[in-house]
Image (cartoon, rainbow, N blue to C red):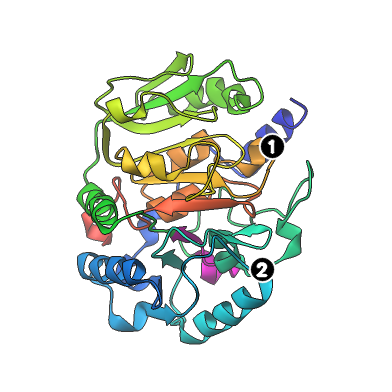
C-alpha cells in the first residue's frame, strides 16, 4: 500500500523504540481527568457517579452539561455551545476528558472524542479518501498532553447499560499496576482492504517480542484464548469474540469503516469489544478509507502502554490522523504503572 512506508518513516522519525517514556511522570492521575456528564441522560449520570467514586475524582472535576441524549450526531453549532461550557468549567490542570455516554458519538464530520480533545475543526474531517490533520500527540513521550500540546485526549466510558459500564470500570481499576502476563494477538486476515496493519507486524515482532509474547495468527478467527492483553484485526465483524478472555486492562479493535458508530452500525460496533471483556477499543465514525494512519498503530499503543502510560494516553498516541475515530474504554486503566508514581 502506498502509505505503508510513510507511516514507517513517521514511526522511526518520532523515536518509536527508543528508551524512555512519559508514563512515569503522572503524579496524581485522578486530578488530571475531567469527567463530562450529560445531566439529561440518567445513564450518563449514573456512570459518572460510579466512576467518580471508584477513581476518587474530586467534585470540581465533574463537568455537567445538557443536551439531547437520543441523538447519534451533534451539530457543529450545538457542540460549540457545549464545548464553551466545558471549557469554562474545566480546571486548568486537567490533561484529558472522560465522557460518560455512548451516544452521541459524532460531531458533524468528527468523532466526539476528537472534537472534545482538540475542538471542532474541519481539517480533521474528510469526504472521500484524503488525509486529515495530524495528531500532535502521536507517539509522544509526554504524559501531559494539554500542558505540552494544548489538547485534552478524550475517551468515552461507553456502554449500553449501567451493568456493562460498571464491569468496564471495575476492570480498569483492577488492572492498575497489575503487570499482567498476557499475550498480544495480531490477526493477519484475508480481507485485503482491512488487513493493511499486518504490514507492520514484522517490525512489531522485532521491537517488542522481548517485552511481551506476540502471536501472529493467519486467518480471521481467534477462539478460546484466556490471556488476551492486545488483540488487533481487520474485518467488518469479529467472529468468536465472546469465547475469548481479556485480562483486566486488555484492549482490542478491528479496522473497518464504521466500528465507531457505536449504537447503529451496519458493521460490528466497537462496543462489542468492551462487552466481550476488553477495557478499551477504537472505531471510526465517518468513512476513513483504509488509511492505516486513521487507526491505532498496534506497535505504538503496545509500546507506550507497556512503558506505563494509562490507556487514554497510550491509545491516543497510536493514531496519526485522529479526527474521524472514537476512543472508548476506561481511560485511567494503567496495568504497567508503578505504585510509587501514583
Q: Is residue 43 left or right of residue 121?
A: left
Query: Does residue 285 appear anywhere in the picture?
Result: yes
Label 1 neighbourhood size at 10 Å, few (<14), some (14-19), many (20+)?
many
Whether the magenta-drawn stretch holds residue 146 is answered as yes
**Furthest-top residue in this view:** 218
Mark 2 neighbour density, 10 Å: few (under 14) some (14–19) many (20 or more) = many
Q: Residue at x 44, y 15 (%)?
A: 217
x, y (%) of residue 207? Answer: 49, 27
Image quadrant assignment for residue 111: bottom right
Q: Can the viewer see residue 28?
A: no
Where disc 1 sits, the SS reads loop
Using the image, determine if residue 237 lies above or below residue 281: above
The span picked out in magenta is 145-155
State the residue position of label 1: 291
The residue indicated by pointer 2 is 120
Residue 89 spot, x, y in % from top left: 46, 85
The label number, if any, that marks residue 251 in the structure image = none
Q: For the N terminus, give its image quadrant.
A: top right
Q: Is residue 177 above or below residue 266?
A: below
Name which residue lies at 64% across and 43% down.
294
Q: Are marks 1 and 2 in contact (CB under 8 Å)?
A: no
Q: Secondary structure at mark 2?
A: loop
Q: Left or right: where does residue 244 sit relative to residue 137?
A: left
Q: Specify whether residue 293 is painted magenta.
A: no
Q: Nearer the viewer, residue 50 or 26?
A: 50
Where residue 130 appears, as percent x and y from the top left, is 79, 44
User: Looking at the image, which residue is at 67% across and 63% down?
Assistant: 108
Q: Is residue 74 left or right of residue 331?
A: right
Amino acid at each position: 500500500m502506498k502509505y505503508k512506508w510513510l507511516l514507517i518513516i513517521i514511526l522511526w522519525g518520532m523515536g518509536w523504540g527508543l528508551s524512555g517514556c512519559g508514563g512515569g511522570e503522572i503524579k496524581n492521575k485522578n486530578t488530571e481527568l475531567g469527567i463530562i456528564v450529560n445531566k439529561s441522560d440518567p445513564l450518563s449520570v449514573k456512570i459518572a457517579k460510579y466512576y467518580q467514586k471508584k477513581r476518587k475524582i474530586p467534585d470540581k472535576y465533574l463537568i455537567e452539561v445538557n443536551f439531547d441524549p437520543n441523538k447519534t450526531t451533534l451539530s457543529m453549532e450545538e457542540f460549540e455551545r457545549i464545548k464553551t461550557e466545558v471549557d469554562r468549567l474545566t480546571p486548568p490542570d486537567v490533561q484529558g476528558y472522560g465522557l460518560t455516554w455512548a451516544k452521541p458519538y459524532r460531531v458533524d464530520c468528527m468523532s466526539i472524542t476528537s472534537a472534545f480533545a482538540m475542538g471542532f475543526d474541519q481539517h480533521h474531517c474528510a469526504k472521500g479518501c484524503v488525509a486529515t490533520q495530524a495528531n500532535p500527540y502521536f507517539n509522544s513521550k509526554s504524559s501531559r498532553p494539554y500542558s505540552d500540546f494544548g489538547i485534552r485526549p478524550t475517551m468515552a466510558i461507553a456502554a449500553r447499560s449501567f451493568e456493562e459500564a460498571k464491569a468496564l470500570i471495575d476492570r480498569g481499576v483492577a488492572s492498575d499496576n497489575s503487570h499482567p502476563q498476557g499475550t498480544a494477538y495480531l490477526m493477519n486476515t484475508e480481507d485485503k482492504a482491512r488487513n493493511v496493519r499486518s504490514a507492520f507486524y514484522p517490525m512489531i515482532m522485532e521491537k517488542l517480542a522481548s517485552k511481551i509474547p506476540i502471536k501472529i495468527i493467519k486467518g480471521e478467527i481467534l477462539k478460546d484464548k484466556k490471556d488476551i492483553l492486545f488483540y488487533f484485526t481487520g474485518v467488518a465483524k469479529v467472529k468468536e469474540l465472546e469465547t475469548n478472555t481479556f485480562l483486566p486492562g486488555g484492549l482490542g479493535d478491528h479496522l473497518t469503516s464504521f466500528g465507531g458508530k457505536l449504537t447503529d452500525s451496519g458493521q460490528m460496533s466497537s462496543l462489542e469489544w468492551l462487552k466481550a471483556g476488553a477495557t478499551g477499543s477504537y472505531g471510526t465514525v465517518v468513512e476513513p478509507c483504509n488509511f492505516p494512519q486513521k487507526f491505532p498503530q498496534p506497535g505504538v499503543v503496545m509500546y507506550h502502554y507497556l512503558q506505563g502510560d494509562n490507556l487514554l494516553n497510550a491509545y491516543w498516541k497510536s493514531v496519526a490522523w485522529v479526527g474521524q475515530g472514537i476512543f472508548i474504554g476506561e481511560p485511567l486503566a494503567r496495568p504497567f504503572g508503578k505504585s510509587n508514581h501514583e
